[in-house]
Amino acid sequence: MATQMKELEEHMALISQMYPGVYTQVAPHQGEPKPRRRRRKNKGTDSGAAAAAEAKKRKLSDEQVRLLELNFGNEHKLESERKDRLASELGLDPRQVAVWFQNRRARWRNKKLEEEYSKLKTVHEGVVLEKCRLESEVLKLKEQLREAEKEIQGMTERIDGVSSNSPSSSSVLSMEAMDPPPFLGEFGVQGYDQDVFYIGQNSYIQGLEWMNLYM
DNA sequence: ACTTCTTGTACGTTACATCA
DNA sequence: GTGATGTAACGTACAAGAAG
């Protein structure tokens, strides 16, 4: 929970960087939140007709919303001069215009957060996929390595068998005779007959074929 | 420098309208 | 009729700037 809050704060900080002047208050409220005062209900306080008339007024007309949206599109911040001008153009109270902008900014931020979230989610899914692919590659390569080591061992044993039959050549080829074991320069081929370490080219290619699936 | 006031903002919440 | 959703409006905390 604390981590989620931290992530959210970081996210909001990011948005404030991306859209300066729109989200300016980054600092979270510290300590225990003070209890909020409950707003009393209107029901029963007014006469029925007055309440109905009041209720009718609540929703802004399509034209009012259209103009407000147009203004919001131009600039998310609302200077008092613009607020007053808009209010008189729309026949609204300046307070209503201010509230509309507040709520509109909140909706905009939420939408932005959702967009950011889905972008990050997509990236994350890609990364997870790549991780799986790399892990599978590691497994394949390990398998190849085991095969190669087995083959080397087999060949070493064959060489040993041969050398024990002809002692004159043992000093040249026996791996045990060398300490440390000759991993033979950088790639372990120097000093050996190329045929001794030959691994069929096809087996290597087959081993890499799976990679093409991802290319 | 300090306090106080004003204004604007984010955020959380409430009340109401609308729709399935 | 009812629950879900959208939104206008409100209450609160906070920051910044102006004024005294």
Image (tube, coloured by chain):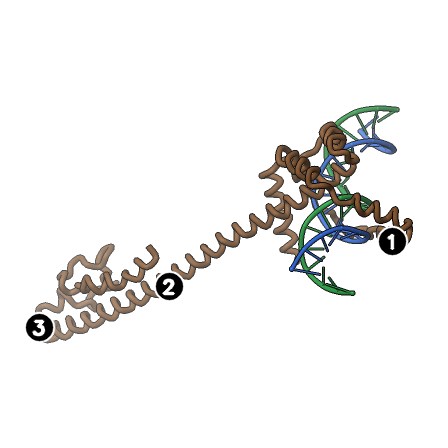
Chain colours: A brown, B blue, C green
Label 1 crowd (10 A; few <14 / some 14-19 / many >=20): few
The residue lying at 79 percent from left, 35 percent from top is A93
Between residue A2 and residue C9, name the one nearer to us: C9
**Discs 2 and 1 share one subunit:** yes
Q: Tell me if residue A21 can be seen.
A: no
Q: Position of residue C9 (x, y in %)?
A: 80, 44
Which one is in front in this view, the residue at disc 1 or the one at disc 3? 1
The residue under label 2 is: A136
What is the three-letter code of the residue carrying label 3? Answer: Ser
State the image quarter where residue A15 is shown.
top right
Q: Position of residue A28 (x, y in %)?
A: 70, 46
What is the three-letter code of the residue carrying label 1? Answer: Lys
Which one is in front in this view, the residue at disc 2 or the one at disc 1? 1
In the picture, the disc for residue A43 is 1
The residue under label 3 is: A166
What is the three-letter code of the residue carrying label 2? Answer: Ser
